[in-house]
Amino acid sequence: MEHRLVIGLNIALTALRDGEPHVLCVKRPGGWGLPFGRFDPDEHRTFELALRDFVERQTAVPLGYVEQLYTFGDKGREAPRASLVSGDEADRIVSVGYLALSPEATEPSLESAAWLPWYRFFPWEDQRAEGQDLRQVIAGQLYRWAGDHEDRQERLRSTFFSADDCWEEERALDRYELMYEARLVAEAHRDRDGVEGPELFGEAMISDHRRILATAIGRLRGKLRYRPVIFKLIPETFTLSTLQSAVEALLGFSVHKQNFRRSVESAGLVEKTSQTAQQTKGRPAALYRAGPLADVATATGLTLPRLKIPARQVVSSPEPSKGSSTK
Amino acid sequence: MEHRLVIGLNIALTALRDGEPHVLCVKRPGGWGLPFGRFDPDEHRTFELALRDFVERQTAVPLGYVEQLYTFGDKGREAPRASLVSGDEADRIVSVGYLALSPEATEPSLESAAWLPWYRFFPWEDQRAEGQDLRQVIAGQLYRWAGDHEDRQERLRSTFFSADDCWEEERALDRYELMYEARLVAEAHRDRDGVEGPELFGEAMISDHRRILATAIGRLRGKLRYRPVIFKLIPETFTLSTLQSAVEALLGFSVHKQNFRRSVESAGLVEKTSQTAQQTKGRPAALYRAGPLADVATATGLTLPRLKIPARQVVSSPEPSKGSSTK
DNA sequence: ACGCCATATACTCGCAGTGAGCAAAAGTCG
DNA sequence: CGACTTTTGCTCACTGCGAGTATATGGCGT
């Protein structure tokens, strides 16, 4: 029998809530997943219109900036049994992933929808503060998986444990794929048989949605560097500290404060308003708005003066250092 | 009646021939087009396998590096009458565009296939030497189209006629879209009615294939900067001059020779072999090969020391001041 | 009112990367 | 042998950025 082709649209809608990146999720039978819908060629003229239709109707959350990520067509990409979009088991599902950004995390109308923090699914992607500890734990597991394989070790080094001050935040997808191969994420066991692994990290999502989210995170992080997309995620006016911590939350690492402000100011990405923000502690900060040069299509993004983590050195030996699993 | 969904795979396969970028094209009833095929879910496990199957079977040209570009799903994207992939007029065609790179332009077995130079379709994308003149001509047409519209003028300035030394080579798609909107490319007339425009630039392709090619060019150019993909397009060993002119041909502008070699050498992207190249004129050049740090996944790309064009200033007067084109 | 604290903002210093160009080296060709 | 061409080595100035020090400006506790 001939299989029918179905196109599913998936969207990783991101917004900041209390300064932390969240993604809009929908509760499904098998767990959390991204909002998605089946693309109906009779009803929708373009993918993007279809998307807006789905999300806004299902959850009443408005979509702002939208960008196509990738089209996933591999057979067996979906979990074996799960046929979520179509009713017919025999259909072949191809899914188009999208990234969307919203300036605020509007409460979804649908009860089964919720904003969940990025790092609930990708704890290892947050390298601020104690993310370092987790990295040690994962390092142990990953190096055990790598064993003597030169190539695996090399991959680890380049994606996960590179020289410490050159953690490439935008390679979130590569890292997820490593975790998958090393069977450190639940999906790896669900998709194939169920040989239990040592320890699992992050919360699973249905189907390949966590992979799509990883793609979205990587893309957004990369884009921050060369396009001023950050302004799609924050309110009209903001303090430079707000701007900075938004950036840090998305990137998963901290930046040098003084240099950061120097770079955004001199690049003309922001302009000062006359008002100042009021808060509890410290000197009141000036309020800024996105400058005239902050056009997403044209302008360049942010320079990111990485902040070196003072203490703690690089990941060195595959030293098991057992015991303390800091979950 | 319900429309069926069909997925078409399009590929922009690029290789260098005599140092100039070419794309593999197939002659179709309506003109030249990119190789493509219909994705059959029963036959192909993944998109990429399907692609390799199509191209290698149809033209006997092997695919090297492959990368997905974008998925085009808009209705009316295809030319009205042309229904090329499927036999059924009523089908809705969604096409997935791919970029592929080959180290050499193997002669295709299929008679209707041929390698055609990029700049035959995008003459304005070649800013080396006399590309400047053409830019003047197009400038005139585009500014006439822009008229008083502030926004249009701004778009022109940022994509086409930015400060002269900051021509953003990777925005080939933006430029094509401008040309389309201004009806300076044949497709614009074909897709809507046929109000003849003033003058048309570059050769047309069927369907939206020229748009896909523009996407491919832009992506490849962008990628050159941050991934060493260039080595997928040149032979195993090469002289630095070869490397440089390959890069220049792809980018469409010239780079500073001494600084270029300094950057590739110091970045460890290349390593010297013991041999030297032999040619007719000038001092023999050392042969290099891709260095150990030239891994596509990990390493960073090239720094591109732009060469300022000595004579001729910014776009001002369409003055056709001929000069000695130093090819 | 005064001093403490926390944050915002200003400014300096040094180095590495990069843009630009000069000059020598090593071949070919008449 | 000298003219010519292309490769290769090297210098120099400037800018951008990493890093750090210092000052401004508010709230708050006593």
Image: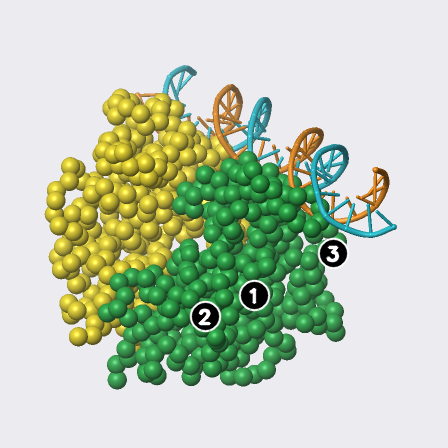
Chain colours: A green, B yellow, C orange, D cyan
Do the residues marked 1 and 2 share a common chain?
yes
Distance between the Cα atoms at labels 1 and 2?
18 Å
Residue at 27% across, 51% down: B211
Q: What element carries label 1?
A: strand
In this rendering, the label closer to the viewer, 3 or 1 = 1
Q: In the rendered image, which residue does mark 2 sit on?
A: A109
The numbered dot on residue A117 is 1
Q: In this view, does A20 lie above or below A110?
A: above
Do the residues marked 3 and 2 share a common chain?
yes
Residue at 48% across, 81% down: A30
- In the depicted view, which residue is nearer to us: B278 or A68? A68
Residue C8 is situated, as x and y percent measured from the top left of the image, at 65, 42
Name the amino acid type tagged 2.
Ser
Who comes first in sequence, dot 3 or dot 2? 2
CB within 8 Å, label 1 to label 2: no
Q: Is mark 3 on a helix, strand or loop?
A: loop
Residue B140 as seen in the image, left or right of residue A283: left
Name the amino acid type tagged 1.
Pro
Which chain contains the residue that carries disc 1?
A: A
Q: In the rendered image, which residue does mark 3 sit on?
A: A312
Name the amino acid type tagged 3.
Arg
